[in-house]
Image (cartoon, rainbow, N blue to C red):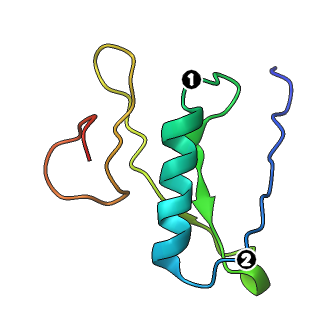
Amino acid sequence: MTAPRWIIHLPTTLTSLDGVLILATALRDSLGHVTAIDFGETTLSEEDSQFLRTRIWCDVRLDGGGRCRRRAEHGGPCGIVE
């Protein structure tokens, strides 16, 4: 049995889905070297509907140890480049 993982809920002042996707991508790109953060599991929710979460990225593990960096439910093959 493994120890439970902790989740950081990070509210923003952003009011558009596009804006929060840009912020999430910038955080992933700038903090991707921090191995304690699992950006592949990142989800979004509206402030008043936090129980309804939407996955951002595909998260499939690729050969070579990386993860797919394309949007969730993307068309075509998985890959590092968005």
Which sits earlier in the primary sequence, circle 1 or circle 2? 2
Residue 25: percent from left, percent from top: 48, 52
Q: Residues within 10 Å of mark 2 (few under 14, many from 20)?
A: few
Task: Identify which residue is drawn at 60% across, 34% down.
Answer: 31
Q: Nearer the viewer, residue 54 or 24?
A: 24
Task: Identify which residue is drawn at 80% across, 57% down.
Answer: 9
On the image, numbered disc 1 is attached to which residue?
A: 33
Q: Nearer the viewer, residue 18 or 57?
A: 18
- Which SS class for mark 2? loop
Q: Which mark is residue 78?
A: none
Task: Identify which residue is drawn at 47% across, 58% down.
Answer: 56
Q: Is residue 20 above or below residue 57?
A: below
- Which SS class for mark 1? loop
CB of mark 1 within 8 Å of CB of mark 2? Answer: no
Q: Give the residue type that dot 2 points to.
A: Thr
Q: Is residue 15 above or below residue 73?
A: below
Q: Residue furthest left?
A: 76
- The part of the image, by quadrant, that contains residue 4 is top right
Quarter that holds the N terminus = top right
Q: Is residue 65 above or below residue 68?
A: above
Q: Is residue 4 above or below residue 71?
A: above
**In the image, 74: left or right of 53?**
left
Q: Which mark is residue 13?
A: 2
**In the image, 78: left or right of 22?**
left
**Mark 1 to mark 2: distance in Å?**
26 Å
Q: Give the residue type that dot 1 points to.
A: His
Q: Nearer the viewer, residue 73 or 79?
A: 79
Residue 79: percent from left, percent from top: 23, 37
